[in-house]
Image (cartoon, grey):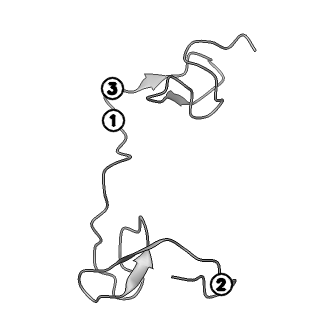
């Protein structure tokens, strides 16, 4: 699907309810408003998260061991 303002190609998925394309990751269809099935691939596990050890950073350590905000390896904030 393309952006109506700038013609940028937006990744899309087809709505099961109306058959129209809507932006990927949308909670509701762009055309009919039906609830979309959103994949939980990037599901954030609130209970088992590992917070960044830097007291000024609000990030969470990802599966690669890196902070999602500052990008440093978990626990390493020496520079």
Looking at the image, is mark 2 or mark 1 earlier in the sequence? 2
Q: Position of residue 61 (x, y in %)?
A: 49, 26
The answer to which of 49 and 62 lies nearer the viewer is 62
Q: For mark 2, what is the residue? A: 7
Q: For mark 1, what is the residue? A: 45
The answer to which of 2 and 48 lies nearer the viewer is 2
Q: Position of residue 23 (x, y in %)?
A: 46, 74
Looking at the image, is mark 2 or mark 3 earlier in the sequence? 2
Q: How many marks?
A: 3
Q: Is residue 27 above or below residue 7?
A: above
| Quarter assignment of residue 43 | top left
Q: Residue at x 61, y 88 (%)?
A: 4
Looking at the image, which residue sits at the far left? 17
Q: Position of residue 28 (x, y in %)?
A: 35, 74
User: Disc 3 versus disc 1: distance between alpha carbons?
Assistant: 6 Å
Q: Nearer the viewer, mark 2 or mark 3?
A: 2
Q: Secondary structure at mark 2?
A: loop
Q: Secondary structure at mark 1?
A: loop
Label 2 with label 1: CB-CB less than 8 Å: no
Q: Position of residue 60 (x, y in %)?
A: 50, 29
Q: Secondary structure at mark 3?
A: loop
Q: For mark 3, what is the residue? A: 48
| Quarter assignment of residue 14 | bottom left
Q: Is residue 51 above or below residue 9?
A: above
User: Disc 2 versus disc 1: distance between alpha carbons?
Assistant: 36 Å
Q: Residues within 10 Å of mark 2 (few under 14, many from 20)?
A: few
Label 3 with label 1: CB-CB less than 8 Å: yes
């Amino acid at each position: 699907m393309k952006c109506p303002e700038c013609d940028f190609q937006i990744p899309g998925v087809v709505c099961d309810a109306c058959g129209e394309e809507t932006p990927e990751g949308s909670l509701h269809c762009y055309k009919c408003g039906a609830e979309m099935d959103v994949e939980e691939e990037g599901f954030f596990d609130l209970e088992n998260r590992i917070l960044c050890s830097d007291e000024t950073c609000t990030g969470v350590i990802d599966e690669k061991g890196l902070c999602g905000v500052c990008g440093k390896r978990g626990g390493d904030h020496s520079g």
